């Protein structure tokens, strides 16, 4: 047991020395950076100069774009008559929601 305790104690001492050296190095680097920025703590309302003027108002938005034309180019795959609308539905307009057409109702 004495050999394990001696090994652990030596490892602990090396870790303590390395962490102390690392802490001192970080403290020195922080102090150098603090001094490079002027070395003053600005706490609270230390600055007494007036606030900067407000920014100018934003430019008005651009006018809306022109609507798309009703004629569109044919797709690259060939004729558009052989293609169905997305979803495989027919080209007739179907009502949405709870609406129904009279010919969709079952006979009474």
Image: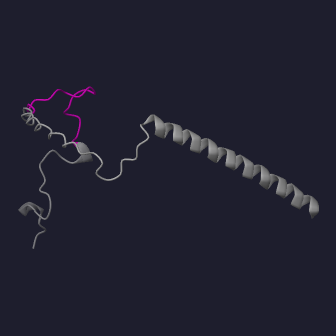
| Residue 91 screen position, x and y as percent | 15, 44
Say if 62 sits above or below 47 in the image. Answer: above
Q: Residue at x 9, y 36 (%)?
A: 61
Above or below residue 55? Residue 3 is below
Residue in view at x 13 percent, y 65 percent: 98
Classify residue 10 as left or right of residue 94.
Answer: right
Residue found at x 9% / y 74%: 108
Q: Point out the image quarter for the N terminus.
A: bottom right
Q: Characterize the magenta stretch by its predominant secondary structure.
A: loop
Snapshot quadrant of residue 52: top left
Task: Please tell me whether residue 72 belongs to the stretch shown in magenta.
Answer: yes
Of residues 24 and 101, the one nearer the viewer is: 24
Left or right of 3 on screen, residue 75: left
Q: Nearer the viewer, residue 16 or 11?
A: 16
The single residue placed furthest to the right in the displayed view is 2
- Closer to the camera, 9 or 33? 33
Where's residue 55, x and y in %? Answer: 15, 38
Nearer-the-camera pick, 96 or 41? 41
Specify start and end residues of the magenta stretch as a single range.
Answer: 68-85
Query: 21 left or right of 66?
Result: right
* Residue 59 % position (x, y): 10, 35
Q: Tell me, yes or no, whether the highlighted magenta stretch contains residue 37.
A: no
Location of residue 26 (image quadrant): top right
**Farthest bottom residue in view:** 108
Name the residue located 36 percent from the left edge and 47 percent from the top edge: 42
- Tally the marks: 0
Q: Position of residue 94 (x, y in %)?
A: 13, 53
């Amino acid at each position: 047991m004495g050999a394990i305790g001696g090994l652990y104690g030596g490892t602990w001492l090396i870790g303590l020395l390395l962490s102390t050296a690392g802490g001192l190095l970080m403290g020195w680097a922080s102090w150098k950076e603090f001094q490079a920025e002027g070395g003053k703590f600005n706490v609270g309302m230390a600055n007494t100069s007036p606030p900067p003027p407000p920014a100018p108002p934003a430019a008005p938005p651009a006018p809306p774009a022109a609507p798309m034309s009703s004629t569109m180019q044919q797709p690259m795959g060939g004729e558009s008559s052989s293609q169905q609308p997305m979803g495989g539905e027919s080209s007739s307009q179907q009502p949405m929601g709870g609406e129904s057409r009279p010919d969709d109702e079952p006979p009474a």
